[in-house]
Amino acid sequence: MTSLFEALQRSRQRQLLLLQGPRGWCDQRLAEIAALEAGMLLLSNREQLPEAIPFSKAETCLGSETRLVAVDLFDGFNPDVLCIAGGLVQAGGVLLLLSPAACYWDTQADRYARWQDDKRSARAYFAEYFFATLQQDASIGVSLTPGSMPAAPSPLPQLQPTAIENGQTAEQSSVLRQIEQWIGAKRAAIALISAARGRGKSTCLGLLVNRLRSQFKILVSANSRQSAAALLRQAPAADFVAPDQLLRECPAADLLIIDEAATIPLSMLHQLARLYPRQVLATTSGGYEGTGQGFMLRFVATLEAGDLRSYQLERPVRWCHDDLLEAWLNRTLMLKPEALPAAESQISVGDCDIDVLREPGSATAWPVLRQVYALLNSAHYRTRPSDLRMLMENPDQVLIVARRHDFVLGVVLLNREGGFDTALCEEIFFGRRRPQGHLLAQMLTAQAGLKGFGRYRGLRIHRIAVAAACRRQGLGTRLVSRAMQYAREKSFDYLGASFALDAETANFWRQVQCRLVHVSYASGKSSGSHSIAVLRPVGDKLGPEIKLLQQRIQQQLPIWMTQFLQTMDAAQVVALLRYADYQATPSESERLEIEAFASGNRGFEICFASLQKFVMQRVAHSLFEPDSLLIEKAVQNRRWSLLERESGAEGRRQLQQRLRGLVDDLRKAC
């Protein structure tokens, strides 16, 4: 082992060391290796190892680095932890894995082989895949088993570290200089630093804070303090404020800096952009978080070209360019999305085959699964390495794939749910049980108040994605139709979905004849948006229940708008009203009250109930894009003080006068 460490130090390469055998043998070898290398970091779930960091706390290590990182796989294989561990190994270091032999992998002892209803993986497909990739690539490292002798290290390409001068790389220095010039010009815009892991983007933000804090009032934010740990180590005096606190208290600042922006809900980022017009964001493109690509697609695409300054950091800092371990992890865990081959970029989807992918974890399905995972990863989903294992092993999952020849063009991922007995339905209804994986069945039983809904058997569309070159050709509709066919063949009661609300997505689900049946009470942790539930019944059995759910939305939506939906983005409110097909007919007295507000001096507060009903109905049944003030005040009744702050120029009197004009225009258009 000494020769391996010396060879790696000379070449500045990083490699994998696999100890594969009985647990006792692996522990003994680990102790011998740890004696050679001080400062080993051990990730393990074994409580009898007090120095070990459990997998659940692996994220606390992000931003640190060491020469030897060991991962104990005897308690189970969590691909997310493997990805985190790989990012902690510095140049010339080793990622060490302790594992039973692949042929002895026992899913019964693997805590990460459990799925909904505590069902277990029938076979350790992910472990088989992982160890097969190791056998195919001898350059990635060394494998030791009982009785084997370590082979002499193969000659490794010599790598050159990225040059650092005055605590920063040339790339970091260039990015900092450009951002400083932009900030000095006092232009309202967003600067985005994107990079793969280990490129020093958080350090770059910390350097920026230190340079500018004497000239500007700077606030630092992130999904959590842990997410900004590297930044705060570089700039310990920085003022950190959580995103929700920024929205709640609106502290003044000349510049807002957000680290790992891709982990913050999209709707929250849009609200922060309104409050803080000058921002510097950083995001990881790829990695265990699985968020960077979706962030680039969704948030950045909404910005005007003149409102965005984009910068990339390409050269790694923690390890070297052309590092073997990084390249292998990217390939094995599929951390970088693969584009559709150029020859297929303009194909017609009319003649593609759409069918269920049988045994997606088997070796024969790996080429297809690689494309499926890349497609999901390139869409707006938060796809993590652990999702790759889910695709291979979850027994309640159905994968339907659209293919033309050998190319995957679209995918829909279904999850079986429901089928509860009466006793369990009652436990869910009263909030005493929450069965894992049964999202729709649980949501409509516990939140929407249909006590017996959980007894129905359903298929939930967990994810659906179409290759960018094939969109708007009807392939998504065909995928849903094939899922509906499968639901009929297997005698399910419904096909449904739950998703973060936005106008484009809502339009798609309306087109595929899914009916709106519920609006979530809280915004999602990952999306920051309220989710809605939609159903398409299989047969006539669910007709009465769907009617009850739709009536409930009609009756309670005005109240919801001023309560838990009060902070919903105006565009989302419009999408929701139109999907719900909101109906309301103002009485004669209400029409007179609306006219008195629009044309006279009748106060807003005493007219609100009539105004809300009128505006909601008109927005729901028209195609115009309403002014956000019309939604935020006449529908959601947000505080005047908040609207004044967001407008930046208008006081309450001016806002109310503008609102009168908007209502009058709407009234005259009737």
Image (tube, helix red, strand yellow):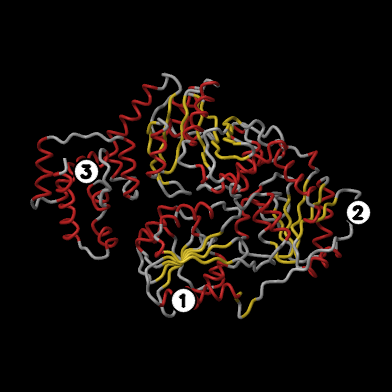
- Kindly identify which residue carries mark 1: 180
Position of 429 compared to 637: left or right? right
Q: Secondary structure at mark 1?
A: helix
Identify the residue at horizontal 49%, vertical 32% (top origin): 478
User: Foreground residue, 76 or 343?
Assistant: 343
Q: Position of residue 61 (x, y in %)?
A: 63, 60
Few, some or many C-alpha atoms within 10 Å of disc 1 (few <14, some 14-19, many ≥20)?
some
Q: Amino acid at mark 3?
A: Val
Amino acid type, residue under disc 1 in the picture: Glu
Q: Give the left or right position of residue 65, taking residue 38 as reference.
A: left
Residue at the top extreme, as displayed:
540
Please tell me whether residue 526 is drawn above or below residue 14 in the rendered image: above
Q: CA distance from mark 1 to mark 2?
A: 56 Å
Which secondary structure, mark 2? Answer: loop
- Quarter placement of the C terminus: top left
Answer above or below: position of 145 versus 433: below
Q: Tell me, yes or no, whether the two marked residues, 1 and 3, touch with CB atoms within 8 Å.
A: no
Read off the residue under disc 3: 615
Q: Nearer the viewer, mark 1 or mark 2?
A: 1
On screen, residue 390 above or below 61: above
For marks 1 and 2 on the same chain, the one whose residue lies earlier in the sequence: 2
Image quadrant containing the N terminus = bottom right
Cα distance between the residues tagged 3 and 2: 78 Å
The residue beneath circle 2 is: 149
How far from the left and from the top, in percent, is residue 605? Answer: 17, 49
Residue 270 in percent (x, y) is at 39, 56
Reading the chain from its start, which is encountered first: label 3 or label 2?
2
Nearest to viewer (mark 3 / mark 2): 3
Gap between marks 1 and 3, in whole Å? 46 Å
Say which of 279 and 350 sits in front. Answer: 350
Tag 2: amino acid: Met
